[in-house]
Structure formats: C-alpha cells, structure tokens
Image: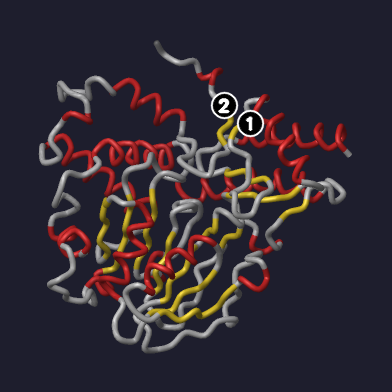
Amino acid sequence: MTVSTSQRIFNFSAGPAVLPLSALQEAQRDLVCYPGAGASVMEMSHRGKVIDGIIKQTEARLRRILGVPESYHVLFLQGGASLQFSMLPMNFLGTGGADYLELGAWSKKAMAEARKVGQVQVAWSGKAEGFKRMPKDGEFKVRPEASYLHMTSNETIEGIQFHRDPDSQGLPLVCDASSDFLCRPLDMSRYAMIYAGAQKNVGPAGVTLVVMSDEFYSKALEDEKRPTMLGYKVHVDNKSLYNTAPVFSIYMVGLVLKWVEEEMGGLAGIHAHNQKKASLLYKAIDGSNGYYRGHAELESRSLMNVTWRLPSEDLEKQFVQEAQARGLEGLKGHRSVGGIRASIYNAFPYEGVEALVSFMEEFRRKNS
C-alpha cells in the first residue's frame, strides 16, 4: 500500500532526519526493481556495473555541488562520524599532537577519542560560557607543530554553528560537518578534510562521507599495527569498495544530491531556504516577550538546530506532548541540556516551521 503524503508528520528529529519527498518517491518507485537492472539496489553486487555507476554518479554530483577539486578524494565509508573521531587521529596525529576547538558535546567526543591516540591541545573552549557561541577568528591560537586543527561546524545539542570558514592559521583544517553538510556554500580549498554522517542532511543512516585533499592524505602516518579498515589508504586505493559498501544508503545520497542540484538550485538555493526557515523560527522566539528563551548567541545561532527554553520544565514537557498531538514530532531537547530543540535540516519544509510557529504562539497565549 502506498502511504499518502498527508499522513506524514513534521519531523523535527535531530537524526535520522527528514528526507526530500521527491527522493523518497523515486526510491519507492524503483525499490523492487531498479530500471534496467532486474533487481533492487539492495540486492545487487557492489562490484557490478549498476552499483558502480550509481556510486560514480553520486560522487560526480557531490563534486559539482560542493565544488570539490580533482585533487581531493571522496570516500563513502561506514561507522558514522563517531568512527572518524578515531580514524582521523590514528592516521594523522603525529608527535606534535593536534589542536581542537571545544565547541560543544560533539567536539568533546572527538577530543576524547583523539586523546586515546596522542596529545590534544584545546585551542579554544566555549565551556565556561555554556557553549553558547562559536569563537571569532583571532580568539584562538594554534601551535605550528600540531598535525591539524579540528572543528565541529554545527553543534546539534547546543544549537550553535559556524557561518564562515574559520582561519586555521596555516594548519590543515579538519571539519566534522555531520549536522550541516551542504547547508551553505563554502570554500573547499580552506579545508584539508570534511567528514559527515549522512543521516541529518544528505541521506539515510549507514554511510559517512569523507572529502580529503590529496596533500593532507599524503601526510597519513604509516602504522603496520593499525587495523586495515581503520586506515584511509585502503579506502582510497579501492575507491570505497575494499569491503561491501552501504549501497542503498549511497544510492539515497545520490537522490538527495539530485534534489539539491535540480530542485533547490544548488548550495545557494539551499542556503536561502535554510535562512528563511530559521529566521521565521527565531523571530517567534525573540518576539515572545521572554516566554521563549533562545540558548545560542545571535551571531552563532544554528540554521539547523534551534534550541530554546520555556519558563519551567513542566511547561516544556507539556509543550512537547501537545506539539506531538499536532503532528510536530521530535521537539524534546537533548537529555544533557533539556529544553526544546527543533532540527530543521536541508529537507525540512518551510510549512513545518510555519506550523510550529503557529503552535508556539497558541501555546504561549494559553499558558502565560
């Protein structure tokens, strides 16, 4: 039975997150039998011509949309960003250690894994301020001997985001972009490596995208004791096909990239779409006469994850329950910080934000 689109909720979940309807519908049409293949994408060999074509087309689209130079490698891996927290230092953290920006919960996790491998210096920390903002250029200083500078471009739990490409002061810049990948145009040449779990902004769970400059890749450390699958070299040499790739997830990423490119006008169009959604929601928070209190400072407000508090935790629980009854799902804040969180990733529709804002005003009037 085909599910009517009228039955779909507005999914504010922090991930896995909403996917473009057109991508889901194309996958639905081709799920049982991919055109010309006689089988589902999920049934075919990852080394066959059909899957090879899908992977190559997906990579080509990503390169066009993001402006990835030919001197960069594109990898489709597994294990999520959490595995990259370990792989990165295992391959690149040398005797000089690495510098990390401590920006929130996810950058703290990345630092903890890197410390298991070697020395980590915190170049800047927002902990004392409650992780309410991102640092400005000039507020942090890196060590020239460090192997790289690591950043998290968007902290989903606290709802703060970089809206620029930070100055890494000459160090290779590595970015965990899991929760805001492809949300805005950026200068890829500023980054040595960007990695992202797909399940928030570019596809379903199961595949992790890694974009790495060949210059940075050439600095990878040799380690005969490191497990084969935890070295980038085997994945580069085998074009992400050393082992069975998550073929259906990669196929879905391709459909999402098609939507970005053909329906949304690339990253410029996506950015405008994201700004419009976030602006409407932040306006509702700011215009509530203090009833709703945003967490992030103005210049660091995330376009992806909007976080705020109500006058009491009881009201927050009531808010979540009543919103859920309206088909507004996934609004409960992360357990570590509480409050409310609305995740409005790339594919989240503007109409969903309108519905949330309308509910927020009604709730405020009834419960003030």
Asked which quadrant contains residue 173, the reply is bottom left
Residue positioned 39% across, 41% down in the render: 203
The kind of residue tagged 2 is: Ile
Whether label 1 touches label 2, CB < 8 Å: yes
For residue 221, the mark is none
**Furthest-top residue in this view:** 1
Pick whichever of labels 1 and 2 is earlier in the sequence: 2
Question: Pointer 1: residues within 10 angstroms few (<14), some, or many (20+)?
Answer: many
Secondary structure of the residue carrying numbered label 1:
strand
Asked which quadrant contains residue 177, the reply is bottom left
For this rendering, which residue is in front, 236 or 321? 321
Q: Where does residue 33 sit, x and y in percent of width and height?
A: 22, 21
For residue 9, the mark is 2
Horizontal placement of 203 versus 37: left or right?
right
Residue positioned 63% across, 66% down in the render: 131
| Alpha carbon distance from label 1 to label 2 | 6 Å
Image position of 212 with respect to 309: above or below: below
For this rendering, which residue is in front, 44 or 314? 314
Q: Which residue is mark 1?
A: 328
Q: Where does residue 59 sit, x and y in percent of width and height?
A: 27, 49
Secondary structure of the residue carrying numbered label 2:
loop
Horizontal placement of 35 versus 27: left or right?
left
For this rendering, which residue is in front, 12 or 49? 12
Q: Where does residue 331 sit, x and y in percent of width and height?
A: 63, 39
Question: Pointer 2: residues within 10 angstroms few (<14), some, or many (20+)?
Answer: some
Residue positioned 55% across, 67% down in the render: 103
Quadrant showing the C terminus: top right
